[in-house]
Image (cartoon, helix red, strand yellow):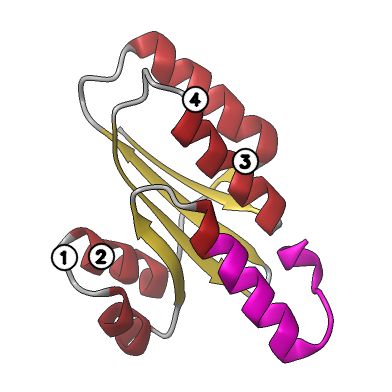
């Protein structure tokens, strides 16, 4: 089961990570987090063993905080490359996307990205709030 969602800011992205870390009935394969100028793309892949009820609950949660998303070709290729085992650095170079996290959910990676980005800009854009 795969979910690809668009989220407007970092706080919502962190809520997805916290949900995945806190809900034990969601057998997670991986989560990928990509930052774009206008928001965040989050791909969550669950093992096929996830129950129908857990799927519906997780889908409802995602629909509350974001919108289902069909990414453009560059982001789709980046997501595919990460899933095929390419390194995040190679994917970022090849497809010009900001891969913030791939694999196990880790809120530190998102928080560090947000802090470094804000420090570099000198202000906090809406997508990093």
The residue at which mark 3 appears reads as 15
Question: What residue is rendered at 73% in x and 84% in y?
Answer: 119
User: 71 and 100: which one is in front?
Assistant: 100
Q: Quadrant where the N terminus lies? A: top left
Q: Quadrant where the C terminus lies? A: bottom right
What main secondary structure does the magenta stretch of the protein show? helix
Task: Provide the residue span drawn in magenta.
Answer: 110-129
Mark 1 vs 3, N-terminal side: 3
Q: Are marks 2 and 1 in contact (CB under 8 Å)?
A: yes
Disc 1 from disc 3: Cα separation: 26 Å
Q: Position of residue 37 (x, y in %)?
A: 65, 75
Q: Position of residue 73 (x, y in %)?
A: 37, 70
Disc 2 from disc 1: Cα separation: 5 Å
The residue at which mark 4 appears reads as 58
Question: What residue is rendered at 37% in x and 82% in y?
Answer: 92
The residue at which mark 2 appears reads as 82
Question: What residue is rendered at 35% in x and 59% in y?
Answer: 102
User: In the figure, 126 relative to 47: above or below?
Assistant: below
Q: Position of residue 80 (x, y in %)?
A: 25, 63
- Between disc 3 and disc 2, the foreground one is 3
Mark 4 vs 3, N-terminal side: 3
Q: Secondary structure at mark 3?
A: helix
Mark 3 vs 2, N-terminal side: 3
The residue at which mark 1 appears reads as 85
The image quarter in which residue 97 lies: bottom left
Question: What residue is rendered at 58% in x and 69% in y?
Answer: 112
**Does the magenta portion include 63?**
no
């Amino acid at each position: 089961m795969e979910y690809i969602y668009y989220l407007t800011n970092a706080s919502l992205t962190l809520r997805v990570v916290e949900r995945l870390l806190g809900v034990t009935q969601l057998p997670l394969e991986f989560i990928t987090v990509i930052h774009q100028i206008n928001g965040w793309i989050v791909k969550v892949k669950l093992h096929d063993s996830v129950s129908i009820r857990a799927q519906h609950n997780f889908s409802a949660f995602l629909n509350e905080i974001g919108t289902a998303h069909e990414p453009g070709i560059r982001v789709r290729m980046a997501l595919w490359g990460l899933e095929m085992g390419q390194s995040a650095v190679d994917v970022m170079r090849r497809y010009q996307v900001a891969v913030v996290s791939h694999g196990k959910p880790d809120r530190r990676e998102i928080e560090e990205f947000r802090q470094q980005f804000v420090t570099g800009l000198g202000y906090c854009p809406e997508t990093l709030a």
